[in-house]
Amino acid sequence: MDTIASLFSFITTPVSWVIVQFHSVYGKIFGPDTGWAWGLSIVSLVILIRICLVPLFVKQIKATRAMQTLQPEMKKIQERYKNDKQRQSEEMMKLYKESGTNPLSSCLPILAQSPFFFALYHVLNGIATGKTIGVINEPLLASARKAHIFGAPLAAKFTDSADKVAQLGASLTDVRVVTAVMIVLMSASQFYTQRQLMTKNVDTTVKTPFMQQQKMLMYVFPVMFAVFGINFPVGVLVYWLTTNVWTMGQQMYVIHNNPTPGSKAQAAYLERLANHVTHHGKIRRRSEKAIVKAIVAKGRDRNEFERKFINGLNKAGLAAQTDGTVVKSESAAAVQTEDGTTAATATATAPRRQQPKRQSKAQRQSGGAKPAGDATSSPSLSKSDEPQDAPPAAEKAAPKPGNGTRSKAQSGQRKGPQRPKSPSKK
């Protein structure tokens, strides 16, 4: 551990100085030797570090969005080389290199705060061993050794012996109960954060090696925290639990307001946005306009949830514009359809064309005569428009006498009654 501490010695002094400054503030409120003063100093250190890492988090979000734009290309590579996993991985890495994206960008916040984590561990280890470190002098060292968090000393560990814990003024049972509860909370928060990312904010239509890696880390990280947590001092457990809770809340905010396209979170977000827009008739937030603008620009490349969102707006009489706004679609205004094309809505619906009724066999044999008042008669001609000298349709179609016999005579048969054929004798 001395080697690791020496590697991060350049940041040990700043970390100890920040803790002392926060302790001077909280010491005036709760008392300088209380666990609240030292515990809140560590929590404030975490909040300060995470605020400083916000630009890095924004960069991480942009890198994640860049990865999402590559989803169609990644899907094509998967379909093309589905039987050759090695070639598929090579083409994926080539695509990452050409687009300038990094699939490991989600690990940047963890890597960036690792130096602060090891520096705090070194500071608390010095307090446990009774050594001054950084700006923590003898009086501050004695005050920190007296601080207890729920009965557990700030520098105590789960694996400490009963004699060492007694020197810090506590019992072994209190230390192990407090550290065990904090380790469980730390691992559970890490697992929930990763599971929330995999189940709600991932496009399930495209499966990449990166997704498999994230799924594996969802189970590996909590186990790692549980195993290594028994060797962490109580102060480090406070630090890591606080940063896990911060990460969980930060991720919940991002998933709720800026979800990944094609994910379950996007379906829920677009449903809420559609309800809001149909109720108020407009979009207020700039972030919502940006999302609607991106959906309209996709055209035919929209996913299932985005097409449902656009169709819902059209049914409500609204149209999404290219600038991200939503306006009421007029009677003949062009609106965006689900396939990205434009269609005009008609002002009045055309009358339905009535299908003619099927005629009976007798009507067809009589020359197509229709009964009076038939619905299939043309509505454009009235009785006054018919010629006066035209004979009725029934008279026109009436057969003349002798018609049947003449037609039979023409077929080569004799006139008059026919002799019945005698049965053949065999």
Image (cartoon, rainbow, N blue to C red):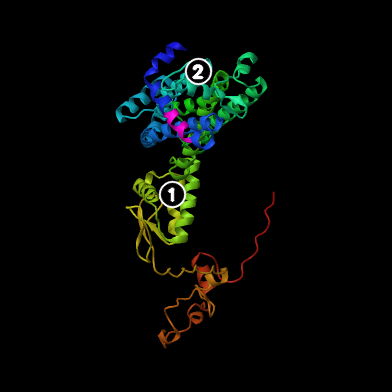
Q: Mark 1 or 2 closer to N-term?
A: 2
Where, by quadrant of the figure, is residue 404 drawn?
A: bottom right
Q: Is residue 350 visible?
A: yes
Residue 149 at x, y = what percent?
58, 29
Report which residue position mark 1 lands on: 307
Residue at 35% across, 65% down: 332
Q: Residues within 10 Å of mark 2 (few under 14, many from 20)?
A: many
Q: Residue 29: image x %, image y %?
A: 51, 38
Please determine whether, in this image, residue 288 is positioned above or below residue 175.
below
Q: Magenta span covers which residues?
A: 18-25
Q: Amino acid at mark 2?
A: Asn
Disc sitting over residue 60 in the figure: none
Residue drawn at x 43%, y 41% as measured from the top left = 261
**Residue at position x 47%, y 47% in the image:** 269
Where residue 390 sits, quadrant-wise, is bottom left
Of residues 75 and 210, the one drawn nearer to the viewer in this rendering: 210
Q: Secondary structure at mark 1?
A: helix
Give the CA distance from mark 1 to mark 2. Answer: 57 Å
Residue ID for mark 2? 125
Percent from the top left, x then y, of residue 214?
48, 28
Image marks 1 and 2: residues in contact by CB distance under 8 Å:
no
Q: Main secondary structure of the magenta part?
A: helix
Which element carries disc 2, helix, strand or loop? Answer: helix
Q: Which picture quadrant has residue 350?
A: bottom left
